[in-house]
Image (cartoon, helix red, strand yellow):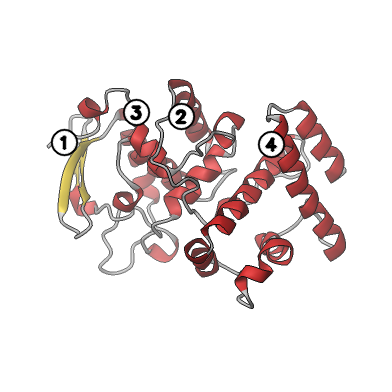
């Protein structure tokens, strides 16, 4: 299938707003143009090719000689040039939608793990605005659809998303400790969220969806490094970085226009502020 024909079909037959269609066309066309000039097949590429495209077309000047080659570069960009990082993440959102359409059309077999190319910077400086009931329903659907085609560690990712809906903040999630996870043997699980000083904080009684995600994740939890008790682990049995929940949320929300185009954008804090229920005070935590 011709990549540019697919782009036209995707934008013409999709549900994106006209302004988003125009923006996505510019971003994806830029990527396809770069592929043509670099001799890269847009149906057979690596994440390093997208990183090189982003560097060559958009980031070279702000990076000022720094390589754009991994998490450290993304973290530096988010810290020193947050507006540029936000624009970069929006380009990744455009490519995510395009390659989901490519998979659905049979042009590729598996989605590239594009969330690894996100800076994870919050995309709005204003206090998070809770999702509407419809947006929350769509989010729950997108979380449920997040599977092995989207990410290798999809069970971990689902658990993170559900923990956000419990009301835990990203900084709490990345510090959750296995030693403060309690199975009450009646179908109920409790967890204590650490505070900024690593003290045991408030108690959360987990909702059934979170419990199911937790039970699915635990048998596949990576082997931790010696002395590591963190619940959520990444490569090599190490704790994940604090910006990962935002990177994940942006990628999950890119799967549906209602969330991808939302203003203000959906962030990890937005989801934590929304919760499972409208009456957050009753359901978020106890004790």
Q: Which SS class for mark 1?
A: loop
Q: Spatial distance from mark 4 to mark 3, Cα to Cα?
A: 29 Å
Crowd tier of the residue under label 4, counting other residues whose Cα lies within 10 Å: few below 14, some 14–19, many 20 or above: some
Q: Earlier in the sequence, mark 2 or mark 4?
A: 4
* Residue 259 vertical position relative to residue 171 in the rendered view, above or below: above
Q: Which residue is mark 3?
A: 276
Q: Spatial distance from mark 3 to mark 2, Cα to Cα?
A: 9 Å
Q: Is residue 120 left or right of residue 45?
A: left
The answer to whether marks 2 and 4 mark residues whose Cβ atoms lie closer than 8 Å is no
Q: Which SS class for mark 3?
A: loop
Q: Earlier in the sequence, mark 1 or mark 4?
A: 4
Q: Which residue is mark 1?
A: 184
The answer to whether marks 1 and 2 mark residues whose Cβ atoms lie closer than 8 Å is no
The answer to whether marks 1 and 4 mark residues whose Cβ atoms lie closer than 8 Å is no
Please report the residue visible at 86 percent of the width from the left and 39 percent of the height from the top: 5
Disc marking residue 20 = 4
Q: Spatial distance from mark 1 to mark 2, Cα to Cα?
A: 26 Å
Q: Spatial distance from mark 1 to mark 4, Cα to Cα?
A: 48 Å
Q: Is residue 56 left or right of residue 37?
A: left
Crowd tier of the residue under label 3, counting other residues whose Cα lies within 10 Å: few below 14, some 14–19, many 20 or above: many
Count every numbered label the image shows and give the total.
4
Quadrant containing the C terminus in the rendered view: top left
């Amino acid at each position: 299938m011709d990549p540019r024909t697919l782009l036209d079909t995707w934008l013409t037959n999709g549900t994106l707003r006209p302004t988003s269609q125009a923006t996505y066309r510019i971003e994806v066309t830029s990527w396809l143009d770069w592929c043509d000039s670099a001799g890269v097949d847009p149906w057979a590429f690596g994440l390093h090719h997208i990183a090189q495209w982003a560097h060559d077309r958009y980031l070279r000047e702000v990076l000022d000689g720094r390589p754009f080659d991994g998490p450290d570069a993304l973290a530096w960009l988010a810290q020193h040039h947050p507006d540029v990082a936000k624009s970069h993440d929006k380009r990744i959102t455009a490519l995510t939608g395009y390659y989901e359409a490519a998979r659905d059309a049979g042009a590729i077999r598996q989605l590239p793990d594009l969330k690894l190319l996100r800076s994870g910077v919050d995309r709005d400086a204003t206090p998070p605005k809770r999702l509407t009931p419809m947006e929350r329903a769509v989010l729950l659907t997108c979380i449920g659809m997040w599977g092995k085609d989207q990410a290798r560690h999809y069970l971990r990712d689902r658990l993170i998303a559900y923990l956000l809906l419990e009301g835990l903040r990203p900084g709490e999630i990345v510090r959750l400790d296995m030693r403060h996870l309690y199975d009450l043997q009646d179908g109920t699980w409790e967890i204590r969220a650490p505070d900024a000083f690593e003290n045991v904080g408030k108690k959360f009684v987990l909702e059934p969806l979170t419990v199911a995600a937790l039970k699915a994740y635990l048998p596949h939890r990576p082997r931790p490094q010696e002395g590591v008790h963190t619940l959520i682990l990444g490569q090599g049995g190490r704790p994940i970085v604090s910006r990962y929940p935002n990177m994940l949320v942006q990628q999950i929300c890119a799967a549906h226009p209602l969330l991808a185009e939302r203003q203000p954008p959906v962030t990890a804090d937005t989801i934590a502020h929304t919760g499972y229920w409208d009456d957050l005070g009753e359901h978020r935590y106890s004790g």
